[in-house]
Image (tube, rainbow, N blue to C red):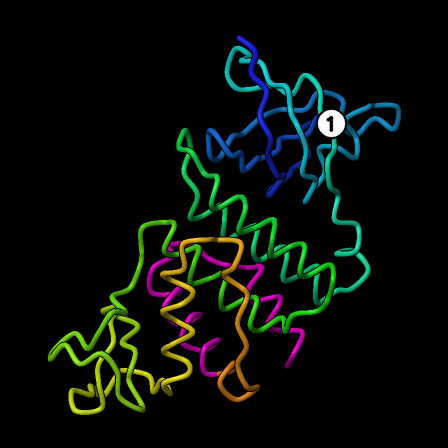
Amino acid sequence: MQTTVKGLIIREQTVGESDRLVTLLSDEFGLIKAFVRRAKNFKSNNLSATSLFAYGEFRLYRGKDAFVVDSARPIEMFFELRQDIERLSLAQYFAQLTYYLGSEEQPSHEMLRLLLNALHLLCKGTKNGQLLKAALELRMLCLGGYMPDVLACYRCGTFESDPMFFDVQEGCLYCKDCFRNNALTAPLSVVTAIRYICLTEDVAKVFSFRLSEENTAILAEICEKYLLTRVDGKLTTLEFYKSLFR
């Protein structure tokens, strides 16, 4: 059986001398693992089209034990990511996070679109990397089934106070009168950004907001700490990205 999907390569590993095992994030079927025969051969038509961060159209057929890539037509390669170690490391983190939060055999149109938009903005270099990271982390968690309760204070129902507090363990907000010791302080502008990231209907607009440098750092801390309470896996790419700033 053959099928054609559009997808992005988020993981690759060499198998044997010349084969490659890739993981695609596809729009229709979510995560797909597939072998690329002789992909490391310089004469192979699939050499670049099945490399990390290649977005394209892939024709697959079901082999004995797994999918096999019959052909690949590249649409976007995101070459600019490889020109800067910070951008590349952040893109690798986005890919690893997608691998942990994505699902097999489930439509993943929004997750794919979110990731493609993030990579596009990374290539352009027009958005603060810390803001991109925070917004992608939080929206990716929402798409993966870990949406926090951000509508109002979890205890009393107050819509907003300045500041509010985000509980990363419980995944909820508290107003200034219901503060708990382990919750992180969130100025009202940060709360507004969190609500926007989680609730905006158009995933293409997730990154369309601005914050001051100080509030961006607060948002980044909240999103990362919340993510680390929900993702069961060692995010080695996150550790490498953060090591660049030490």
Residue 36: x %, y % from top left? 68, 24
- The magenta stretch is 218-246
Query: Which residue occupies the foreground of this view, 50 or 125?
Result: 125
Query: Which residue occupies the foreground of this view, 160 or 16?
Result: 160
Residue at 52 percent of width and 10 percent of height:
64
Please give left or right for residue 198 compared with residue 87 in the image: left
Task: Report the residue that reaches farthest toward the left.
Answer: 156
Residue 233: x %, y % from top left? 42, 54
Residue at 73 percent of width and 36 percent of height:
75
Residue at 29 percent of width and 85 percent of height:
164
Task: Report the residue that reaches farthest toward the top.
Answer: 1
Whether the magenta-drawn stretch holds residue 227 is answered as yes
Q: Name the residue under label 1.
A: 73
Residue 126: x %, y % from top left? 70, 69
Q: Give the total number of marks visible in the rendering.
A: 1
**Does residue 163 lie above or below 201 as drawn?**
below
Label 1 neighbourhood size at 10 Å, few (<14), some (14-19), many (20+)? some
The kind of residue on which mark 1 rests is Arg
Displayed quadrant of residue 44:
top right
Residue 87: x %, y % from top left? 70, 63
Quarter of the rendering occupied by the C terminus: bottom right
Please give left or right for residue 13 compared with residue 218 in the image: right
Does dot 1 land on a helix, a strand or a loop?
strand
